[in-house]
Image (cartoon, rainbow, N blue to C red):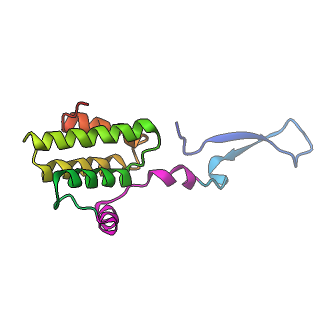
Amino acid sequence: MFYDTLEIESLNCASSNSNSKERTSILDFDFDFSHFFEGNQKMNARELASKMQAAGLTILEGTLDSRVRACMEAVKLCIRPVSASDKTCLRNIGRWAGASCESGTYCPEELLARIIDHALEATNPACRNPKAVFMYLMKTELHYAA
């Protein structure tokens, strides 16, 4: 829990009495919290679109397989997979998306765009665990089941 005026008791070394204490406000310290938020910056749709264009990725043209791969690469740009489990999870989502589009459950353009939108939403700085938020959105909004 954060407090606006958190008081820290510290020993006053300048004082002749070693038992005297000085109250210092946390606002008096110069903290740099930027390193906590480096990997969790929100990527907006324009940034993602420019990165996709630079990489030659499109979800509107080509075969269904190439569009699903482009979608999964876009998700990887938003949410970086770190472990083997993360990579497997994204592969399973890609397989599910391809199968759902082939069976006619979803329109490919709509489904792939919604997957990318959920990945963008999960990268919100307020989200502590973007991968978990992404999976939650996939399961609740798109009824994803591996």
| Residue furthest to the right | 16
Can I make out residue 134 in this image? no
**Magenta run includes residue 37:** yes
In which quadrant is the C terminus drawn? Answer: top left
Foreground: 15 or 97? 97
The location of residue 135, given as percent across then percent down, is 31, 37
Q: Determine whether, in the image, residue 117 is placed left or right of residue 10.
A: left
Q: Main secondary structure of the magenta part?
A: helix
Foreground: 26 or 79? 79
Label count reads 0
**Magenta run includes residue 128:** no
Q: Looking at the image, which residue is at 86% across and 35% down?
A: 19
Q: Looking at the image, which residue is at 54% across and 49% down?
A: 36
Foreground: 106 or 28? 106
Q: Determine whether, in the image, residue 2 is placed left or right of residue 73.
A: right
Q: Determine whether, in the image, residue 94 is placed left or right of residue 18.
A: left
The location of residue 49, given as percent across then percent down, is 29, 64
Foreground: 94 or 113? 94
Q: Name above or below for residue 24 compared with residue 54.
A: above
Residue 18 in which image quadrant: top right
Q: Looking at the image, which residue is at 28% across and 62% down?
A: 57
Q: Name above or below for residue 87 compared with residue 56.
A: above
Q: Name above or below for residue 28 compared with residue 93.
A: below
In the image, the segment drawn in magenta is 33-56
The location of residue 110, given as percent across then percent down, is 13, 51
Can I make out residue 126 in this image? yes
Q: Looking at the image, which residue is at 37% across and 37% down?
A: 88
The location of residue 26, given as percent across then percent down, is 64, 47
Q: Determine whether, in the image, residue 50 is placed left or right of residue 66.
A: right
| Residue furthest to the left | 104
